[in-house]
């Protein structure tokens, strides 16, 4: 390998994986193969918990997965870190979501959990259908307490009190506003940035040789942390103060374009 080894961290949705055609562009697949053959490390760094990365795992070979906004970190076959919401806290969270007229998804390492009753919130119904199609929807519902989860997302409508929910949830969780009444809730002290920190420490890669690729607000922590930050063509404006390179949309071969222009491949 020529030059220093780099560590590359990719968000999934809207970055590697097209939300339009539900696939990874061939150009991105080839670019990642080439980067790894050169000796660079390639990691998925996603808000999705491990079970929800199954579509990407079937399409790409990478060096590891940072899942659930830093709640689980897998390098090769080794689990570097894993955190689960304490059982009793999880039970309280389910009650709080319903108390404030919200609905959503509880995301575990092995499966995801939905409320048994059909949601009045269209986005929850759509998410449940998609998760079920991928085989990641647990038969257990919120009425049962025989499982744990790592993080969760909530969705609101005009009958919801998101502010009240946020106040009661308190400082033990970070709430990321993804827009459109969709909120990602992560245990405090975990983020895509903490995942990167653990991985580069494990492999001895310098921060200046770390590259992050993303498009949305849940990528903000890794954009704030890294030195080389690639924003996709369609991206949240919150990323712009930290972006060091703007590339094309995922469907327009944005990943491969950036990797070539930056000299990674």
Image: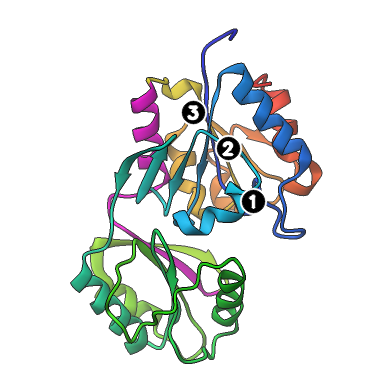
- Circle 3 sits on which residue? 227
Residue at the image point whose x is 40% and y is 67% from the top:
152
In the rendered image, the vertical position of residue 54 relative to residue 59, given as above or below? below
Q: Which residue lies furthest to the top in this view?
A: 2
Q: Where is residue 187 in the image (x, y as percent from the top left)?
A: 30, 58
Measure how far apart labels 1 and 2 are at the Cα level. Answer: 10 Å
Measure how far apart labels 3 and 1 are at the Cα level. Answer: 18 Å
Q: Which of marks 3 and 2 is nearer the N terminus?
A: 3
SS at mark 1 in the image: loop
Residues 155 and 53: in front is 53
Indicate the quadrant where residue 21 lies: bottom right
Can residue 247 be seen in this snapshot?
A: no
SS at mark 3 in the image: loop
Q: Which of marks 1 and 2 is nearer the N terminus?
A: 1
- Circle 1 sits on which residue? 235
- Circle 2 sits on which residue? 243
Quadrant placement of the C terminus:
top right
Determine if the magenta segment contains residue 193: yes
Measure how far apart labels 3 and 2 are at the Cα level. Answer: 9 Å
């Amino acid at each position: 390998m020529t030059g220093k080894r780099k560590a590359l961290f990719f968000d999934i949705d809207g970055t590697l994986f097209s939300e339009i055609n539900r696939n990874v562009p061939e150009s991105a697949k080839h670019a990642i193969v080439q980067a790894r053959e050169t000796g660079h490390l390639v990691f998925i760094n996603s808000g999705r918990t491990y079970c929800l990365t199954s579509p990407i795992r079937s399409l790409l070979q990478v060096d590891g997965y940072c899942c659930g906004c830093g709640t689980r970190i897998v390098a090769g076959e080794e689990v570097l870190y894993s955190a689960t919401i304490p059982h009793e806290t999880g039970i309280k969270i389910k009650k709080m979501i319903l108390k404030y007229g919200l609905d959503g998804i509880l995301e575990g390492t092995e499966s995801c959990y939905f409320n048994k009753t059909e949601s009045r919130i269209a986005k929850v119904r759509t998410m449940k259908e998609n998760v079920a199609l991928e085989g990641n929807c647990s038969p257990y519902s919120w009425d049962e307490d025989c499982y744990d989860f790592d993080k969760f997302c909530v969705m609101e409508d005009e009958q919801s009190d998101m502010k009240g929910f946020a106040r009661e949830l308190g400082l033990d969780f970070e709430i990321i506003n993804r827009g459109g009444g969709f909120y990602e809730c992560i245990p405090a002290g975990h983020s895509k940035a903490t995942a990167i920190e653990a991985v580069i420490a494990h492999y001895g890669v310098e921060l200046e040789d770390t590259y992050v690729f993303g498009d949305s607000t849940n990528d903000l922590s890794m954009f704030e942390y890294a030195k080389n930050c690639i924003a996709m063509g369609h991206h949240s404006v919150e990323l712009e103060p930290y972006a060091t390179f703007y590339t094309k949309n995922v469907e327009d071969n944005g990943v491969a374009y950036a990797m070539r222009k930056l000299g990674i491949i």
